Amino acid sequence: MLHLLGVNLPDQKLVQYALPLFYGIGQKTALKVLATLSIHKTCKIADLSEPQVNQLSTLLSDMKIESDLRKQIRANIMHHRSIGSYVGRRHAMGLPVRGQNTKNNAKTARRLNGRWLKAEKREYSSSTRSIIPSTDSPFESFFNRKWF
């Protein structure tokens, strides 16, 4: 296995099918990368030479992939939410963003967009109790109640 930029690439896979294991690289981008590095489509990861691996790593390090891309997407969503746009409100409610129907089939959107809601709930405490301890003991509050 080749460990490249935090992703394990299996030796037996073709390079064009191993590159989409990176978040942010699809089939078309993988073929473009192969064309720029002049690597044949039937070349496997194990067949790559050391200079080709170095060229591949430098080319991929210049691209916005993996955690950098995830941070950018998260920042874009938070920007939409902060300015109060329609898209941001739909993200905040966990509903489909791009105009899909919500009568029956919005399970995927609720699952994906609901992540942002769950993250916010973890940040803020949902309990209504006060953090500051009360000066009255429970007995004093019981006896100080107005019963009549």
Image (cartoon, rainbow, N blue to C red):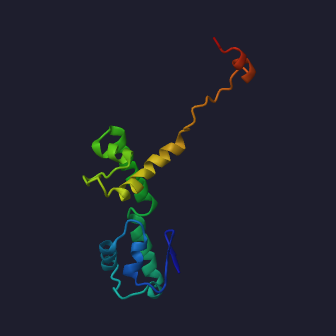
Percent of width and height locating residue 125: 56, 38
| Whole-percent x, y for residue 38 in the image | 33, 82
Q: Is residue 144 left or right of residue 101?
A: right
Q: Name the image quarter holding residue 26.
A: bottom left
Residue lying at the far front of the rendered structure: 148
In the picture provided, is 120 more to the left or to the right than 106?
right
Residue furthest top as drawn: 148
- In this orientation, which residue lies closer to the viewer: 144 or 79? 144
Residue at screen point 37% across, 45% down: 93
Q: Quadrant location of the C terminus?
A: top right
Q: Residue 10: x, y in percent?
A: 49, 81
Q: Nearer the viewer, residue 29 or 57?
A: 29
Q: Nearer the viewer, residue 20 or 107?
A: 107
Position of 142 with respect to 28 (left or right) is right
Quarter holding residue 147: top right
Q: How many marks?
A: 0
Q: Residue at x 33, y 85 (%)?
A: 41
Q: Position of residue 143 (x, y in %)?
A: 72, 16
Nearest the eye: 120 or 47: 120
- Image height check: is 88 above or below 40? above
Q: Which image quarter: residue 19?
A: bottom left
For residue 122, above or below residue 7: above
The residue positioned 48% from the left and 48% from the top of the image is: 118
User: Is 7 placed above or below 97 here?
Assistant: below
Q: Residue at x 33, y 43 (%)?
A: 89
